[in-house]
Image: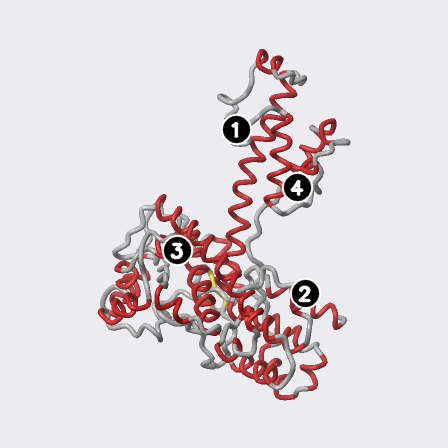
Amino acid sequence: MSEESVYRKLYQGVRSRYMPETVAGYLAELPEIVRDTQILKLVKQRTGRRRSSMPESWFQPVDLRKKILVAQALFEDQIKGANDPRAHISPDESDPEIIGEFLQYLNEKLHKSINYNSFKHNRWNREHRAELEIEYGNHAYNKRFRLLSRMADHLDVYRKEKRLVSYRLAGKVGLVADLEFDEFRSDPWTAAFVAYYAARKARRSVFTNAAQERPFDDLCAALLRNCENRSVNWEVIARVFPDPAILQRLDDEALGRLLGHWLLYLRDLAEDLDKIWRTSDINLETMVVKRGNDSSTWNLSAQAWNSARTGWLAFTQAMGAENIIEKFLPGKVLRLIAGDVAAWHASTSGGIHQDTLIWRELPFPWSVMRGEAFCDKRLIEATCQRFRVDPVQSGWCEANVSRKTVRYRPTPELVHGVEISSPEMAGLLRKLGWFSGKQ
């Protein structure tokens, strides 16, 4: 594999879900890694491992390519030669806003509102079609009406799922959704650290009542030490590892740029969390999931919120703007927990997790973001102290980005979070439906 191909694979892995062992295999092909015997030794400890039986990519929403092609065929006369730029899009278009404008254009040509899609109640009858000078016959009109209605429904789902993909990346890895290849490729040590650390962060959670293993291992530490002795792209590294010592290397423009990215995530997440909260009967007292809770979307959004909040805190403090945090500090968002894990935790730790007690005492973060409720550092500190929690170590009042190095352990085979002894057994259990909640 050529050196350029290796960088392309590493770049793809940052926004996918490559195992750390997979990334290490690509790192072993980089000349800079090969020449560094200490780094190469750590890399080779991770290569030669079995490939995971689980996908090494995130869930991707189903695009509208097929429906766009059908629409372009059915509305060929309205599209061909049209001066309206909304009429001309590629079938491979992935931007929901551009697809929405295309759909709006077609709806206008059919004298249909994009928000009225009931085949029973919203179609025009023959008399109204004649008044509106819609030339299609009954069958042709119905065919186009159905297509546009289904496209509108699909676009709503696609827009939501695209947003959740970006939340998943932000929550698990960092600000990598818009990371350009040229930035990533700017120097080998930046690429090596970001690719490997991103893979460590993106690992699947293990079914446990204790804390998950931290991602910063001995190879991460060694790669970062090499970065510190060279001229590297610290802004790219800060996207996945907003450590105070790293942020001190950035100028105000770079700090402000990345701070703005995290603020946009907080704004959008606040609205989505509020909607989920209003439509789900979530038990605030225990945060134990129950039937009817959209736990997947809630937990994904909660994780993204907490990561964005950590990033916002880290960059705000790096810019010397602690006075903002003194007056305005939305709290963390607690994830929903499975009943069996809650019972396990209660039996070993003696009750509800302290973070849950703090979370239910503080104003909802989305209300704080909109200015409907007040929450500052002093309130959070007082609440943490009441429940005997260190507000700094717990991440409630400061960005908790750890450099504490953990020893490397091979990535385990998991089936719905349960650790399995081998890939073959994991594949068999998954095929049989074990751990999936099915009968």
Q: Residue at x 52, y 78 (%)?
A: 248
Label 2 and label 1: CA atoms lie apart by 41 Å
Work out whether mark 2 precedes mark 3 in sequence or the reverse, and give the earlier one: 2
Say what secondary structure mark 4 lies in: helix
Q: Are the residues at dot 3 and dot 1 in contact (C-beta closer than 8 Å)?
A: no
**Which tag is nearer the camera, tag 3 or tag 1?**
3
Give the residue pinned by disc 3: 369
Give the residue pinned by disc 2: 181
Work out whether mark 3 precedes mark 1 in sequence or the reverse, and give the earlier one: 1
* Three-letter code, disc 1: Asn
* Three-letter code, disc 3: Met
Coordinates of residue 409 in the picture (x, y in percent) = 49, 77
Give the residue pinned by disc 4: 65
Work out whether mark 2 precedes mark 1 in sequence or the reverse, and give the earlier one: 1
- Measured along the vertical axis of the image, is residue 139 above or below residue 205? above
Give the residue pinned by disc 1: 117
